[in-house]
Image (tube, rainbow, N blue to C red):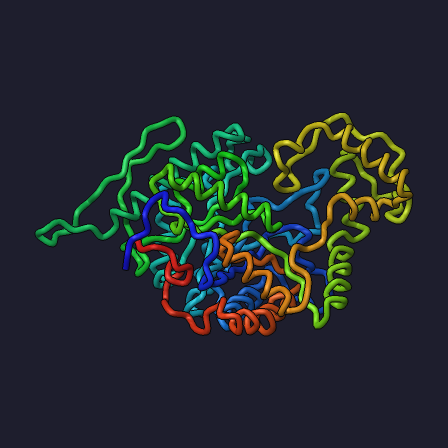
Amino acid sequence: MTEPVPGAAVPEYDPNAQVHLGVFFTGVGSQLIWTQPDSPSHTSVDTFLAVARLLERGLFDAFFLGEGLRVREGLGRVFDLDVAGRPDAITQLSALAGATSRIGLVATQNTTYNYPADLARRLASLDLLSRGRAGWNIVTTDNAWTGANFRHGGWLEHERRYERATAFVAAAKELWSGAGSRPAGGVDCVRWVERDTDLVRLRATATVPPSPQGRPVLFQAGDSDGGRELAAAHADVVFSANTDYEKARAYAADLRSRLARYGRPAEAVRILPGAVVVVGETTREAEEKARWLREEQVSPPQAIAFLEHYWGRDLSDYDPDGPLPDVEPSDTELDPSRGTIAIENRTGKLAQIQKWRDLAAERNLSIVELVRAVSSRRPPFVGTAGQIADEWTHYVRTRAADGFNIVPHLLPSSLTDIVDKVVPELQERGAYRTAYEGTTLREHLALPPL
C-alpha cells in the first residue's frame, strides 16, 4: 500500500468514497427534545446503552459524548429547560465499552481545566479497556463561570486557550508514543516527557500500555483560526459546523492546505460536519417534521429564557405570544454562563436588541415568533431517505466532507430513521459499509496508520 504524500492534491471526485457517520450526543441545549412524554431519560446509562447498540447495528463509526463542566444557569438559577447534570464522559463511555464490541467511543474533555499527564492516562485507559475504540474530542474554555469550579476564573485569554491546547495535546501524544517502548534487551524503558512553560508544566511517563490502535483518535471542533491550526497540527477528525455544501467545500480546502504546512497528508484528517437530519416518507412529511422540530426546540418558556439572557432581568411575567418586553435591558453585556457564546457575540447586545425590536415591529412578531426567527434555522438535511443518501454521497465523493456527525433531536426515532432507512439507501449506492472491516475506531475511519 502506498503511503499518502504530505501536501499531495486531493482528487476533486472520488467515486469510491464512503460516508462515515458518528452521533454527537449533546450535553446541554435545546437541540435534543427531552420533554416529550415518551422521551427516555437523558441521564440514564440505559439510554446511552440503547443508543450505542443502535449505532453499532447501523455500522456507525463512533458515539460521541458531549460534556459540560458545569450545569448552565440563568439569572443565578439552574437553567431547568436543559438536561441538568451528566456523568463524566470517560466514566460513562467505560460502561459502554463492555456492552458493545465495535462502535467507537469519543469523550469530550477540556484542555483548559485538566492536566496533561492525568487526562492522557484516563484516555489511554479507556482506549485500552475498549480494545482500541476510544477517541478524545479536544475542547477549550475561556469563561470565568466554568473556571470558578477550578479556582481559576477565566484564566486564559480567548486565543491563548489554543496555545495551551496545542502544547497539551503534543505532551499527551508524546506520552502515548512512549507507552510500552522497550530497549533492545527487552527491559522496560522509562521515557520521561517534560514541559516547563507558563501554560504547560509536567514531568511524567506513560503508565498504561498502548491499545491495538496505538492511542485514542483525536477529534477537534472549532472554526476559529486557532481552532483550525490546532486541528491541522494534531487532529485525526474535525467536527465542523459547515453543513452548507459550498461552505463545506471551502472549509475542507482551507483545512487541507493547513495540513500540508505541518507535513501531514490530506487523508490524515476526516472532516465530519455536525448535522441535524429529518427523514420523512415523502418530502412534504419531512418538511412538516422539520417545522415541528423548530417549534419544539424554541418552546414558549425557552423563548422567554432566551430574551432573559439578553435583557439580563426576569421576564417571566411576559406573555410569550405577546409583544417584546417594553422594559429596558440591563447595561451589562452577556453572561457566558448559559453555555458557549461566540466571542464576537458577547458585546453589543443593546444594538442587537434594537434590531430585534425593529424586526418584530416590521413583521408583527410575538416573543416566541421573534426568537424562532432569530435563533432557529431549518435543519440542513431534510427529505426522504433516498434524497438524503444522494446528498451525502455527493458531499463525500466531491470531497466536501468525509461524512457527518449526527446531532439527534428526538430519541430514539431520529436515529432509528437513519439506521433503518438512510443507511440501506447509502449501501445501495455503494457509499457505506455493509459490515465493520476492522475492530478499532482508527480502522473504522480509514485513517492512515500511526
Q: Looking at the image, how many numbered discs can be counted on the residues?
A: 0
Which residue appears at 59% of the width and 68% of the height?
A: 418
Residue 374: percent from the left, percent from the top? 76, 43
Q: Left or right: 107 with respect to 410?
A: left
Out of 305 and 418, give the one closest to the viewer. 418
Work out whether 5 lies above or below 351.
below
Please tell me which residue is depicted at 59% across the width and 74% down the height of the picture: 420
Quarter of the image holding residue 193?
A: top left
The answer to whether residue 136 is seen in the rendering is: no
Q: In the rendered view, tell whether residue 144 sits above or below residue 96.
A: above
Residue 387 visible in this rendered orientation of the protein: yes
Determine the residue positioned at 76% across, 57% down: 296
Q: Position of residue 191 (x, y in %)?
A: 21, 43
List x then y, in percent, for residue 17: 46, 61
Residue at (34% x, 44% y) in the render:
6
Q: Find residue 346 and report its horizontal and vertical position in percent.
A: 66, 31
In this view, the residue in front, 178 or 294, is 294
Q: Which quadrant of the figure contains the N terminus?
A: bottom left
Q: Residue furthest left?
A: 185
* Residue 5 located left or right of residue 105: left
